[in-house]
Image: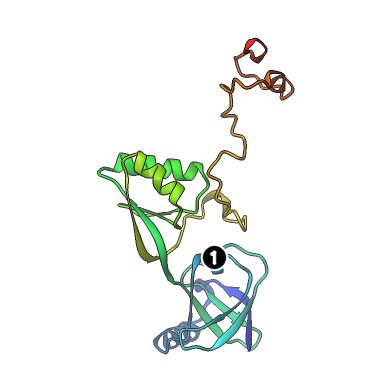
């Protein structure tokens, strides 16, 4: 089994290598991988022509559709984003779509953004939230290429946290009987929690 250990930038490919990649694509000698697999640095996969191969890369960012890998013998293989089930989000206007993107981004959901729709991996909690915002959602089959943004170097930034587990200080109005706990965090909010009973 061939093991591919190096990632090449398309701009680094010679004309001859680009021709090889094109011929391989015609012969279905490439990998179609879903987003979860493209986030891994080590995996086994089958090409579209059913050849099994291994990938063992240094920890790097997610493999983008169209990127090329090489092995120590100089063999090349191209990675393509496979179609997978996604939730497509649409709205009656651009402002509502922008609001949807804001709320999804606030939950750190991997999100693919196009001019007329947003796409994310299926999650009924998020779909319900978007419905309440007046957005339309439907399941579609499409390649998933989410925005990389400021977090592109962080592997596994894929945790679906629907509750604010990171404590974005959204708990000012909790009137439970833990009034002394706010004082120990030395927050400089303008509320005094000691008088709330």
User: Which of the two residues, 185 or 181, is positioned nearer the viewer here?
Assistant: 181
Q: Position of residue 54 (x, y in %)?
A: 62, 81
User: Which of the two residues, 179 or 52, is positioned nearer the viewer here?
Assistant: 179
Q: Position of residue 67 (x, y in %)?
A: 51, 72
Q: Is residue 65 above or below residue 169?
A: below
Q: Position of residue 102 (x, y in %)?
A: 43, 41
Q: Position of residue 36 (x, y in %)?
A: 54, 65
- Residue drawn where x is 67% and y is 22% of the image: 187
Is disc 1 placed on a helix, strand or loop? Answer: helix
- Residue drawn where x is 26% and y is 42% of the image: 93
Q: Give the residue at the far right of this rendering.
A: 184
User: Which of the two residues, 41 or 75, is positioned nearer the viewer here?
Assistant: 41
Mark 1 packing: few (<14 Cα in 10 Å), some, or many (20+)? few
With 91 as the anchor, is 143 left or right in this view? right
- Residue drawn where x is 47% and y is 55% of the image: 147
Task: Report which residue position mark 1 lands on.
Answer: 36
Quarter-of-image position of residue 112 = bottom left
Q: Is residue 96 above or below residue 143?
A: above
Quarter-of-image position of residue 104 = top left
With 118 as the anchor, is 171 left or right in this view? right
- Residue drawn where x is 68% and y is 18% of the image: 179
């Amino acid at each position: 089994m061939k093991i591919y250990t190096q990632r090449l930038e398309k701009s680094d490919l010679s004309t001859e290598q680009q021709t090889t990649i094109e011929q391989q694509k015609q012969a279905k000698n490439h990998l179609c991988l879903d987003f979860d697999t493209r986030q891994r640095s080590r995996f086994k996969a089958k090409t579209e022509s059913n050849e099994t191969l291994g990938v063992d890369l240094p920890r790097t960012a997610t493999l983008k559709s169209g990127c090329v890998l090489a092995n120590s013998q100089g063999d090349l293989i191209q990675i393509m984003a496979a179609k997978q089930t996604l939730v497509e989000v649409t709205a009656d206007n651009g402002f509502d779509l922008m609001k949807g993107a804001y709320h999804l981004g606030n939950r750190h959901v991997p999100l693919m953004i196009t001019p007329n729709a947003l796409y994310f991996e299926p999650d009924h909690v998020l779909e319900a939230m978007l419905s309440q915002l007046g957005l339309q959602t439907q399941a579609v089959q499409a390649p998933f290429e989410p925005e990389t943004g400021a977090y592109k170097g962080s592997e596994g930034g894929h945790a679906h946290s629907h509750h604010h587990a990171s404590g974005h200080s959204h708990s000012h109005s909790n009137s439970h009987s833990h009034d002394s706990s706010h004082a120990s965090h030395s927050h400089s909010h303008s509320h005094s929690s000691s008088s709330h009973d």
